[in-house]
């Protein structure tokens, strides 16, 4: 069976005064039903932009370059006209945004907003849409959903609102849920609850989840696969367990080294030196080489994509020398 | 929102005052003589305030109280309808300019800039000059059509701000149609400042209407109007001051009430003001 989502050679460019900024530069990945893929990377690496591209919501003046391909069930999303595209948004692909405090309209009740999502895609009566909204609130674990459906967003906590956002994203039973940093704005215990909720819903509904995050801690134990992004490219992609056991790319290793661990004996974290270069001035070849502790002369040319193990790939010259 | 205004001392006074005026304007005429009837031109004219005529009578022996109360009906309904029209027009233009942006925005806003550069009274006089005797409906339309320029800028600014709100982006991501975005996500959130501006505009329109009627250009006799009553009272102002004083007082009280409500609404809706 072909994968649910297939992204090939995705490039997103912003025209700037300093020349075109290719914020996403040739990203490819696939995602199957019932699986979770995590896109991990630091701020500005293009992970959110990748998520927005799936719904063609790249903020202007940014454009998805020709030659990119995003296929959902084999159908090219980049070729869709506005009306079919609108029907994909929300109906086939649901999206959960980062900040639940600002993602809900303050002047309508949450039940109303969930019902709105349903009625945007299905011809159902107001009453029926409302009944489904209440059922969804129940499903995302909001106690007393009948009463809560009449609450306004400001009457709810951040965790509750994020549950509402998830309910809205799920309202039309999408095949793919894109969660862009769904827990960044929440505190740690609520984070865990929300992530568990996403896991449970994925398993119950057999949908695919694309989880965008900067936090490797969130990824462990939740995602099936992880793709690590740096400066607009995927540098390493692997099943979660394999990545955590053998991070291979120097950038991934750097991320792990800069993460606090309970078992660690050393008392200082090792940061990655330097900063992410701006998208207008990506360094040639491997984009990480100016910051890479194991940089070599070859690094100024594009590194090859290497298979570390089956299903574990990375692009770094280091792999070739080891093999030699 | 009215609750917010009620909680301010000025707002409470204004709302109570306005409620009294509206109730009197609604039920008062049932208990009062016909404002146009001239019972006794010889002996009933220019009677001072007394038991028979609480506000006295004018030079045509008409009951001043009855005319003031009927005038309240006219003034309030003209002002409310005109403001409703200008608020609608302002929302429409501001929405379009703010949402579509670019050339649409530039053209519309330059037109509004131009219109704002001309005094409103001047535009009104030009428009009213078309008629020999302006019908009430036309007066309302003309007042409404000259009052929306400021509102449209207000709405445009709000839409520019709201357009970037995450819930608007979220609605797009959920496949909401453009009409839905505009009507549900942008308009309701942009209404608070429009409400405040419109309330204050009611006071302005009452004054402008009274002014036009006083100049003999607005509402004409026999329809009772505060401005026209003051015009009629000019000749008798020293011998029978009640003919002009009561409609004048009515204008002042009504405008003060409306402005108190408007200002307290503004304070209640704007968290930046203390």
Image: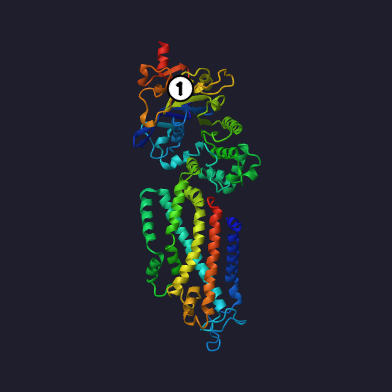
In front here: A85 or B216?
B216
The quarter of the image holding the C terminus of chain A is top left
Residue A11 appears in the picture as rendered: no
**Where does the image place residue B7, in percent across and percent down from the top left?**
61, 57
**Position of B7 relative to B41 (above/below):** above
Q: List the single residue furthest toward the bottom.
A: B42
Q: In screen coordinates, is A200 left or right of A1?
A: right
Query: Who's the residue at 41% across and 67% down the image?
Result: B121
Provide residue B132's location: percent of width, then percent of height: 39, 75
Q: Vertically, is B229 above or below A5? A: below
Q: How many marks?
A: 1
The location of residue A153, given as percent across then percent down, is 58, 44
- Residue indicated by mark 1: A251
Rendering coords of residue A49 (x, y %)? 44, 34
User: What is the chain letter for disc 1?
Assistant: A
Q: Residue furthest top?
A: A324
User: Within 10 Å of the Cα at label 1, are there few (<14), some (14-19), or many (20+) other Cα atoms?
Assistant: many
- Is residue B101 at all visible to an observer of this figure? yes
Left or right relative to A288: residue A128: right
Q: Nearer the viewer, residue B32 or A36?
A: B32
């Amino acid at each position: 069976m072909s994968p649910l989502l297939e992204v090939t050679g995705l490039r997103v460019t912003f025209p700037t005064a300093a020349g075109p900024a290719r914020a996403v530069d040739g990203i490819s990945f696939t995602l199957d039903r019932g699986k979770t893929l995590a896109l991990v990377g630091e701020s500005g690496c293009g992970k959110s932009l990748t998520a927005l591209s799936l719904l063609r919501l790249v903020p202007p003046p940014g454009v998805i370059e020709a030659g990119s391909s995003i296929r959902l069930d084999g159908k090219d999303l980049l070729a869709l006209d506005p009306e079919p595209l609108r029907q994909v948004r929300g109906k086939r692909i649901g999206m959960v945004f980062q900040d639940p405090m600002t993602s809900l309209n303050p002047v309508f009740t949450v039940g109303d907003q969930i019902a709105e999502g349903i009625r945007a895609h299905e011809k159902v009566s107001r009453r029926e849409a409302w009944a489904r909204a209440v059922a969804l609130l129940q499903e995302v674990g909001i106690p007393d959903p009948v009463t809560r459906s009449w609450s306004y967003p400001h009457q709810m906590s951040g965790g509750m609102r994020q549950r509402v956002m998830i309910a809205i994203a799920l309202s039309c039973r999408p095949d793919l849920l894109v969660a862009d940093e769904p827990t960044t704005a929440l505190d740690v215990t609520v984070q865990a609850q929300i992530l568990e909720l996403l896991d449970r819903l994925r398993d119950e509904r057999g949908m695919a989840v694309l989880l965008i995050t900067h936090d490797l801690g969130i990824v462990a134990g939740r995602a099936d696969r992880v793709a690590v992004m740096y400066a607009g490219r995927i540098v390493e992609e692997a099943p979660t367990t394999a990545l955590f056991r053998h991070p291979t790319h120097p950038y991934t290793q750097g991320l792990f080294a800069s993460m606090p661990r309970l078992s660690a004996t050393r008392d200082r974290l090792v940061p990655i030196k330097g900063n992410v270069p701006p998208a207008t001035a990506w360094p040639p070849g491997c984009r990480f080489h100016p910051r890479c502790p194991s940089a070599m002369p070859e690094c100024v040319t594009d590194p090859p994509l290497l298979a570390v193990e089956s299903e574990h790939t990375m692009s770094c010259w280091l792999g070739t020398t080891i093999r030699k | 929102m009215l609750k917010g205004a009620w909680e301010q001392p000025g707002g409470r006074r204004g709302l109570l005052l306005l409620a009294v005026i509206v109730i009197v304007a609604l039920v008062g005429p049932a208990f009062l003589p016909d404002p146009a009837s001239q019972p006794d031109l010889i002996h009933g004219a220019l009677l001072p305030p007394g038991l028979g005529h609480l506000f006295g009578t004018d030079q045509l022996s008409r009951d001043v109280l009855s005319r003031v109360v009927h005038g309240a009906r006219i003034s309030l309904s003209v002002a409310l309808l005109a403001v409703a029209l200008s608020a609608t027009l302002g929302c429409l233009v501001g929405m379009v300019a703010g949402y579509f942006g670019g050339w649409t925005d530039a053209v519309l806003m330059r037109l509004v800039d131009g219109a704002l550069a001309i005094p409103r009274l001047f535009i009104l006089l030009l428009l009213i000059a078309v008629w020999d005797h302006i019908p009430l409906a036309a007066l309302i339309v003309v007042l409404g059509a000259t009052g929306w320029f400021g509102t449209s800028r207000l709405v445009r600014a709000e839409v520019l701000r709201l357009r970037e709100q995450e819930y608007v982006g979220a609605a797009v991501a959920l496949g909401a149609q453009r009409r839905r975005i505009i009507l549900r996500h942008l308009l309701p959130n942009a209404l608070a400042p429009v409400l405040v501006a419109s309330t204050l505009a009611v006071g302005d329109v009452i004054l402008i209407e009274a002014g036009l009627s006083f100049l003999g250009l607005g509402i004409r006799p026999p329809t009772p109007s505060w401005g026209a009553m003051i015009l009629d009272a000019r000749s008798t102002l020293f011998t029978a001051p009640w003919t002009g004083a009561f409609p004048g007082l009515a204008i002042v009280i009504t405008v003060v009430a409306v402005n108190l409500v408007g200002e307290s609404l503004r304070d209640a809706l704007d968290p930046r003001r203390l």
